[in-house]
Image (cartoon, rainbow, N blue to C red):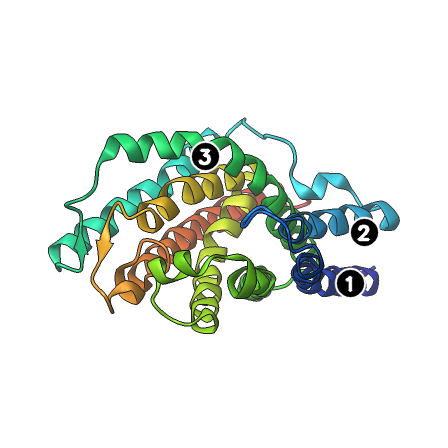
Amino acid sequence: MNKNSIRNIVVFIVIVIISGWIGVLVDSILTDQPEGDSLGMAIWLVLPMLTAFAIILFSKASWNDIGFKLNFKGNIKWYLASIFIFPVITVIVLIIGVATKWIDMSSLNLKPLILAFCSIMLINFIKNIFEETVWRGYLTSQLVKLNLSDWKIYLIVGCVWGVWHIPYYLVFLSEANIQTVLPASRVIFAGVAIITMLFWSVLFIELYRVAKSIWPCVLLHMVEDSLVNPLVISGYITIVTGKEILISPIIGVITSVLYLAVGLGIRAYRRKVDQIVFRTHPGC
């Protein structure tokens, strides 16, 4: 059973890693496409989920592992957390940034920011169904079934999630957006982003595991894409050059540590609940 599971995971990871490069190849052939909305990007986004579904079908695995059920009962607090985690941490980071004079908020106007947030929420919700079905729903659930330690799961999922993004950072993402977030080469930006995703993986994985559903993670990811990214990329705030790596709401070290702390807090809660359940129902 474990050998088959490991084989399936390896096949999945290999296809995931090459999916973006298949998209890059397609775009190099079909050059007359809109920037940021190409067929290659669609392949990069969709192919991992199609691969996961194909593996589940052919291996006759259970669809329940993915966590498509809403599981509202007992989990409303995690749905609420998924909506507020990114905004609350972002506010904390902005306060630190203003106090240290690393962030200038003089051009921040809440009304257009809120309008921008609302205008892209739906598309980001749909986009993140693809991502969270793959990274949390499929990959995380399969690694959990192998009885790997939490830290190995964080590392594997975070690395695969990050490596999958490499074609996006090196090819698909516009140079202007990269320079706005972190004035550096594409390679350096990709490296920093992957490290950031390793930190974020703890939060996303623990939210998925504690709720036993992908939907809080979809909401969490939607809020991040719709709020935090435009805040920086669209110029609502200005970060002092050279301080981005420390205080950026997207890739800052301080920001990532705060998300890691929240993730570890959820992990502590989950483990405590699991111990109580085990003591109460030792046969489960």
Q: Which residue lies furthest to the front in this view?
A: 32
Which callout, 3 or 2, points to the residue nearer the camera? 3
Give yes or no for contact between labels 1 and 2 (Cβ–Cβ under 8 Å).
yes
What residue sits 65% from the left and 60% below the top?
20
Q: How crowded is mark 2: few (under 14 residues within 10 Å), some or many (20 or more)?
A: some
Which callout, 1 or 3, points to the residue nearer the camera? 3
Residue type marked 2? Ile
Secondary structure beneath dot 3 equals: helix
Who comes first in sequence, dot 1 or dot 3? Answer: 1
Residue type marked 3? Ile
* 245 displayed left or right of 168: left
**Marks 1/2: CA–CA distance:** 9 Å
* 253 displayed left or right of 15: left
Q: Count numbered badges in the picture.
A: 3
Secondary structure beneath dot 1 equals: helix
Who comes first in sequence, dot 1 or dot 2? Answer: 1
* 64 displayed left or right of 92: right
Q: Split into 4 quadrants, where in the image is the C terminus?
A: top right
Residue type marked 1? Val
Q: How crowded is mark 1: few (under 14 residues within 10 Å), some or many (20 or more)?
A: some
Q: Which residue, given by chain and number where applicable, does mark 3 sit on?
A: 120
Q: Residue 11's mark?
A: 1
Placement of 214 over or under 232, stated as above or below: above
Placement of 72 over or under 281, stated as above or below: above
Give yes or no for contact between labels 1 and 3 (Cβ–Cβ under 8 Å).
no
Q: Which residue, given by chain and number where applicable, does mark 2 sit on?
A: 55
